[in-house]
Amino acid sequence: MAGLGFWAVGIFLRPGTDHDPLGGCMKRPQKNSTETRTIDAPIGGINTVDAGRAMPPTDCIWAWNMVAAEYGLRTRLGFREWALPVSDIDGNAGQVRTLLPFTGSAKSGAANKLFAVTSRGIWNVSDSAVNPSIALDFLSYAWASGAGDAGYGTSCAFSTPAGRFLLYCDEVNGLFVYTESTATWLPVVVDTNVAWLPLTTYVSGNKVTNGGGIYRCTTGGVSANSSGPSGLGTGIADGTVVWAWDSDPVVGGRTIGPSIADQILGYTADPRNFVFVTAWKNRVWLVERDTDRAYYLDTNAVYGEATSFAFGAKFRAGGPLRCLSNWSYDGGSGLDTSLVAVSGGGDVSIYSGTDPAFADTFGNKGCWSVGAVPNGRNITTQHGGDLLIASAMGVAQMSKLGLSNSLEDRGIYATGKIGNLFAQLASSRRTLSGWALHIHPTDNALMVLVPSEAGVNTEQLVMSFTTKGWTRYRDLPMLSACVWAGDLYFGTSDGRVCRNIDYVDEVPLDNSTSTPVKYSCLSAYNNLGNMRQKQVQLIRPVILSGEDSPVVQVSALYDYDLVEPENPTGSPSGGWDSGVWDDELWGGDYYPAQILDGGAGMGRDVAIAIRGSASSRIVLVGFDVTFTQGGIL
């Protein structure tokens, strides 16, 4: 046995042979030529500024109808109709150009209101109803003029000891006020009078109110130290001033008029010329059309005397005053709020203090430029103590604007990673109406509304606050938007008001139909470490889905092919998000989908495209990829 053992070892361990002495052939194991890679979901969002091969793997070429969320990229929210189309209500097709949210003082929410503004007027759409009994009950106030940009406006809620109000300024029709206590909208009337004051210099033409009457100065001078003008007629002496009775004051007090100093300058403070409204430090501020002036009211007032403040001296690039915004920051001694003025030329001036009537308590703290700004007045929004400002170069961050020496510094802009895309959209659409910035609470994101030509759906640029990654939304007919009762609502160009919820599109008021949300994404290109030819064999997307059979198609694209693949066919099925409430069983959170797809084609650089239709919440976690490699050519 020892000899047999020695002989066996000698046969099988003899070096240099490939043959079995019993006649078989011993094949050496072949090297596996298939390689695998894992690609994570590109939560860093779209990148249009880095070179193709320098793009981080966490970024992507495009991402439509997706946003960074838990575990990866999820499909955007869908929408359902909230209010009847205005075209059905008033018999004429009308764009919903502005939405006005109002939160009342009642804890129950009974006084909360939502208003839609069109070129015809203000509509009450607080309640979602399929068939209103009297259609025109929805029309809260009809405009005197529906021409031009009527209906494009801004709003501001304001509380005083007299109650809670909602102020709205229209580009054509001026200032209107909604009063919670009466649940009515009424225009603010111009009043060229102010209360009479003792020992005050008046000039011919000044008007004052005193003792229940309005008086016009016919001879200038200094008023008496008490009483003031009274009675009717002319030649009423008051110190060295002479007055004439003019008329009775406007009943109800819904007036705004200029201060005496502004009367002397010839300013009217006419509410019909106010085009923007905001509140700053318990004062209402109103921007006058086509001027560099804003007017401020007394503290805790929505009517009364308005005093002008000119911002133009700080506007180096020129243009009228476009809007005013609040900016909160830590000045070293606690939180403070500055007033930020933005001009049509893109100048941004910062003011701080308390009372704008006195230079020692209110003054300019700096002026910067963001370049040209897009059309409209909803071009700023506040978030997390910062102020974001839309310009042709991107969405600038106020906190970083003063720290840079150049507008070309990418770090200034929240849109830095999509700077080329944003500039392209701004260049081609900057003059269109409908640009706006909004905070989307349920998406935890910043949304930029990008207008389109008539008849074409708008698109939205969306930045996740958690990852700062940008994606794009489409198929949302969003012309205007607001946040009301915790959800995002939007108005459409065909007169509808919709609610941005759930995960299907185009749900009518009767819930009879729906359309899946179509999403698409292309990962960053990668040469996988060398310039050899690659051929993808299999792709497995890692998907968490509310459906047990999601409709998904994946493919490999090569060498910077940027053509979006076609939509996959089929319909999603199953899942708790697609069921009918009270009719379906609760099925849990997600189904982990296992989908394999083959690759086709060949190239040096590879990217993975995914396109699908979703009727529930779907999250893309990443891709598993197998591929083979060839030669350099």
Image: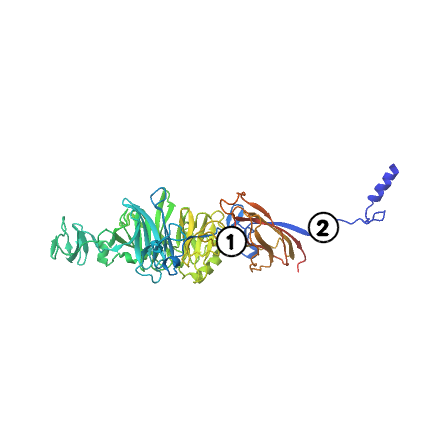
Confirm whether residue 32 shows in the render.
Answer: yes
Q: Residue furthest front?
A: 133
Q: Is the N terminus in the top left, top right, bottom left or bottom right quadrant?
A: top right
Element under disc 1: strand
Q: Check disc 2 and give the amino acid type.
A: Lys
Q: Check disc 1 and give the amino acid type.
A: Val
| Residue in front for this viewpoint, 40 or 97 | 97
Query: Counting other residues with Cα less than 10 Å from the Cα at mark 1, is it few (<14), some (14-19), or many (20 or more)?
Result: many
Query: Which residue matches tag 2?
Result: 31
- Image quarter for residue 148? bottom left
Q: Residue at x 65, y 56 (%)?
A: 535
Q: Answer left or right for 499 relative to 232.
A: right
The colour scheme is rainbow
Q: Residue at x 35, y 54 (%)?
A: 134
Q: Is the C terminus in the top left, top right, bottom left or bottom right quadrant?
A: bottom right
Element under disc 2: loop
Residue 37, which numbered label? none
**Mark 1 or 2: the one toward you:** 1
Q: Give how far across and how far down residue 350 sits, in percent.
A: 35, 51
Q: Pick whichever of labels 1 and 2 is earlier in the sequence.
A: 2
Q: Give how far across and how far down residue 19 sits, in percent.
A: 83, 49
| Residue in front for this viewpoint, 573 or 277 | 573
Residue 517, which numbered label? 1
| Residue in front for this viewpoint, 350 or 282 | 282
Q: Answer left or right for 357 relative to 562.
A: left
Q: Give how far across and how far down residue 581 sits, in percent.
A: 49, 45
